[in-house]
Amino acid sequence: MAVNVFASATEGGNTAVPLGSSGVAATIDCPDLSERLTTVPQAARPEVDTELARLDQQIATAYGQLQEAARGADDGELDEAAVLDPLERERAATIERIVAAVDKAGDRPEGLDAEAACALRRTEATTAGAESGGPEQGQRQDGKEQEAGNGDDADGTGQDAGGQRPPGNGGQAGNGPVAGDYAAIESVRPNAVEAPRRDGASNGSFATSCGVNAEGLFNSDNLIAAPGVGNGAHHFHDYVGNQDNDAFSSDEDLAAADTSCADRGDKSSYYWPVLRLQNGTVEQDAQSPGGGIEGNAGEIVTPAEVTLTFEGNERGKVTEMPRLLRIITGDAKAFVNGDANANASWSCTGFEDRQLKDKYPLCPSGSDVVRTFTFQSCWDGRNIDSANHRTHVAFAAADGSCPDGFRPVPRLVQRIVYDVDAPSLQDGGKTVPLFAVDSFPEQLHKPVTDHSDFINVFDEDLMREMVDCINTGRACGAGASPGPGQGGDPGEGAGEAPQEQPTGDPGANPGEDATDEPTEKPIEEPTGAAPTEEPTGAPQQGSGAPEDDARQTDPASPSAEPRAATTPAGAADDRSAAEAVPGAEGGAGAREDVAAGAAGEPRVPQGGLAETGSGLGLWPAAVGGILFAGGCVLLARSRRHAR
């Protein structure tokens, strides 16, 4: 069977992939076996995790083969079976090993062999000649008209997997995103709804300040989903908090590690896919697995601000999280899996009462992009992880109630702000570059695939302090807001935090389980703690002192080199691979100190007092001294005249 493959809608003039006349784009759609394996005996989990990661690698390899076939195809025609049949055989053998591993430790799973077959998923991309390029433009998928507000948008394939920069959208070359993946935030109706709170609700909050990863700790591992597997994520993550987090980190490694958090009692690991500008910048991961080789190309953007807030429950008290609890929110494969586990939320500063689930926001001038992750806050009371990394935790209902057998724990809300401009969709990002999150290659950088991970490594005393603070209605923690009236302009775009519970439809209104603004009391911030915003209060505008402070007070040494924790696929546990390496030289617009896609060093004031402005507080005293001396002179002269 033949299929026509069309490159990204946003890259006019790209010759890396032949463009078929049908305008069809395709990606590989395989069943996600991890969603089926909800129960795996503990003894079998290491082998099962390794084989699940092998399935991901097989899909990534097949996607690369699809791209290669598209390049050499006449008018985009290719033999579909030549890509899918070998993939099915490889998957069948891997699934057999998974079944055998589970059978050896417990009950044999049934029906998994039917999950081996994959398909090519076809969509239509907006043509490069379409000048509108806006989110209003209609799309077609599988022969049906779709509005841009729906979850299945135009996409494309044909990325130059070698990481070189072809013409077009900064190196993605058909791997997404496309114009239909963006929406103007001003066109979105307010949809964040405040959840009602009962008497006895836990209205406090605890904020921890862990910086913005200014030193550049990245890798393409995932300790939760693919422990012991190098490049298990197939995309790069930003890390804050725990500084020893790669595929081979043990619980003991996490406990003994350093932390970027201002409160040294928080060694938790917080990580999420990096955001990139598709501007052609060649990061050091351009030729690395998880980076350019797998379609993740362009300049990694360091967040302007990261706020990590733990909130309470709408109907009662919360209990302590168990140490080493692991939570994944969102679904990195939501584009092909569907939106059942999707939990992305995108917005703009000043407009956070409007949340997007399956679109990147186009923010007006002066407003910044905001990613928000609201984590599951119900725990089963027994397990710190589960076979599919989901069933041991759950989302609370809109009224705060947890499923039977689950208990409420503090709800983590991550808010990540980026100072990036709205891309120029009409010319495919040539004037102002596109931005997108890293993703598995076949997920085409869709915004609905956004996700975040958390491993609780709080000191037990600090966790008890957090719970007491939340349950007694106080605002605590090193990252706590200094008090009412200290945030951004509440007059415009004030809204609530995104809902906790994912919706079945990413286009549906979020906010059904948003939390109320916690009761506050002013808290003196420790030295070096980054100022943060209200977790659910009025959003701040995209520029101003709070975000600048967040950039400069990140706990990063000015002289430290960016660090990478990239583990090559299939590598043994070699900690030396995570050591600092010299920064790469970059041209105009490229950052100088980059290691495996590392971000540049934090900006540090330099020069004398006059250059930095640090001595401004001395000038009033100096002026006063001059005036006093002048007065004395005048007084002496007047006395002489009087004689």
Image (cartoon, grey):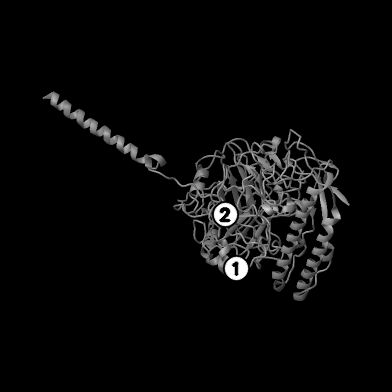
> In screen coordinates, is 606 left or right of 475?
left
Name the quadrant of the C terminus.
Answer: top left
Picture quadrant of residue 363:
top right
Determine the CA span between mark 1 and mark 2.
24 Å
> In screen coordinates, is 589 left or right of 295?
left
x and y percentages locating residue 612 in the rendered image = 41, 42
Q: Does residue 422 lie above or below 257 as drawn?
A: above
- In the rendered structure, which amino acid carries the disc numbered 1? Ser
Near-viewer residue (261 or 123): 123
Q: Which residue position is annotated with label 1?
A: 250
Near-viewer residue (625 or 380): 625
Residue at 69 percent across and 37 percent down: it is 425
User: Seen from this angle, which residue lies furthest bottom?
Assistant: 104
Near-viewer residue (462 or 387): 387
Q: Does residue 432 lie above or below 251 as drawn?
A: above
Say which mark, if any, is on residue 595: 2
x and y percentages locating residue 138 in the rendered image = 79, 38
Q: Nearer the viewer, mark 1 or mark 2?
A: 2
User: Seen from this angle, which residue lies furthest top?
Assistant: 641
Q: Does residue 50 lie above or below 617 as drawn?
A: below
Q: Helix, strand or loop at disc 2? A: loop
User: Seen from this angle, which residue lies furthest left?
Assistant: 643
Number of numbered discs on residues: 2
Q: Does residue 426 lie above or below 513 as drawn?
A: above
Residue at 49 percent across and 60 percent down: it is 264
Which of the marked residues, 1 or 2, is nearer the chain's N terminus?
1
x and y percentages locating residue 604 in the rendered image = 46, 47
Crowd class of label 1 (few under 14; some 14 to 19; many from 20; radius 10 Å): some
